[in-house]
Amino acid sequence: MKRHLPILTALLSLLFATMINAQSPSDPSRVFGVIEAYYRPGEAGALGASWDRIIFNWNRFQPGSPEEFDASSIPDSFLNDAAAANRQIVGLIKSTPFWASTTGTPAGVPSGLDLPFDDPANFFGAYVRRVVEYYAPRGIHHWVIWNEPDIRPGEGSVEFEGELEDYARLLQTAYRAIKSVDPSAHVQLAGLTWWYDVNHYREPYLARLLQLLNRDGQARANNFYFDGISLHIYFTTSSVREILDANQRILRAFGLGAKDIWLSEFNASPRRDPAAAIGSPFQVSLEQQADFVVQAAAIALAEGVDRMAVYRLWDNDFVPGQTEPWGLLRADGSPRPAFHAYQQVIQRMNGAGQVTHLQRGGGEMVMFQFPDRTLYALWSSGTEPGEFIINAAGVSELGAVDAARNPVEIQMVDGRVVIPAPGAEMIDMNFVVVAGPVRIIELPGGSRSVSYRTAAGTSTLY
């Protein structure tokens, strides 16, 4: 889970035009998820989420000894509600019980990882086999192995105290244990945060891990012990493409470019929500949260991400002044604008034949091409306002909406639609956190010419 974001003195920006055409996701029916949908299954259904993540805390299944197996921490209702809604469950395995932890904490390295995965004294391997044996018949075939091991002691909320070599052994054990029980199961790497390594001048965790695994003579025969990577990206619009691109390059460098890429957590907590305001360097508004959800999702789709999930559906444990309001729903169940924003993403952006991301002159666009129509998601990258101009010849009725689907002003001038694009609001940082307000418009037929105009001039996007 994302509780803290390291503050950068500067973020990488896209200073030139980019054009990315997405590949189809590995499973187009399972692209859009939301974390902890099980708390509010009705709202998750209304949102349209097709998958959910549940944490399988080892220390709850086996709190006192390896002989125990208490599945009561995952109520049957969670699985039944998901099955009724055709919502797939992804299991996140983490949290070492005290008796198996080398440090006695849930973040401690499990004892016995140096043993074969099926040795009874490899306690983690034994637990993983048991949990997969129990839940595979109940429809769970996707597993994430731990969470955010790239956050090191002293840097933030630590979920894995072990070194890189310890996580590699953890992953090897889990992969072999899972596949021994459920050969077609899907194994994801732990969610990685990216910026903790950048801020502490380390090579990216994924690169270091693959270098280590590459020295294992059995790694390639075992698919490098994972089927996909999981990334956590928060708050900053410009970082979405940068982080996805960087991780794709790392995978390709090891010949692993076909691995799944999941944006398994993304959001921008709205700390200017009057109902849940807390102090924070990132004073994101409700509208900016909605904008970021659309921007991050659209860019991720253009980058060919296989799955994504907003963290999270509901502020189930929100404490005013102490915790961050991450939910698409407030603690009282009322929807934030971001709920409607993600709902719009799911309803309108899924299934496009081609998704193209372009940026030039301060204007940014993600274009979704369907057989009979084209959807445009548009915004200003920087603080300067501008306007998008799209060829609308032959179109008689037009309408544009913002991220949360509220109507926005447009004009028709000489067969072209002009859509004002306000500049981004600067919030506390000396860089743009969330880009400018999103504008979405759909036009019949194929792609049309698009330009972006500011006081400095006009740039052709497409």
Image (cartoon, rainbow, N blue to C red):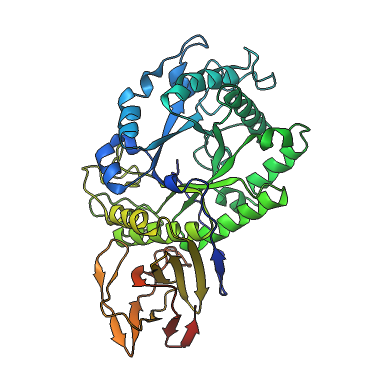
Q: Nearer the viewer, residue 172 or 156?
A: 172
Identify the residue at horizontal 51%, vertical 73% (top origin).
359
Residue 43, picture quadrant: top left
Indicate the position of residue 64 as horizontal and vertical percent values. Answer: 47, 12
Indicate the position of residue 11 as horizontal and vertical percent values. Answer: 54, 63
Left or right: residue 265 versus residue 76 is right
Q: Nearer the viewer, residue 395 or 408?
A: 395
Left or right: residue 236 versus residue 165 is left
Q: Is residue 398 visible?
A: yes
Identify the residue at horizontal 47%, vertical 21% (top origin).
59
Compared with 5, 111 (above or below) is: above
Q: Is residue 284 visible?
A: no
| Label total for image | 0
Compared with 322, 243 (above or below) is: below
Residue furthest to the front in view is 371
Indicate the position of residue 386 as horizontal and vertical percent values. Answer: 39, 80
Left or right: residue 72 versus residue 64 is left
Q: Nearer the viewer, residue 184 or 299?
A: 184
Q: Nearer the viewer, residue 1 or 310?
A: 310
Of the 4 image quadrants, the one containing the N terminus is: top left
Compared with 63, 191 (above or below) is: below
Indicate the position of residue 106 as horizontal and vertical percent values. Answer: 50, 26
Left or right: residue 439 versus residue 124 is left
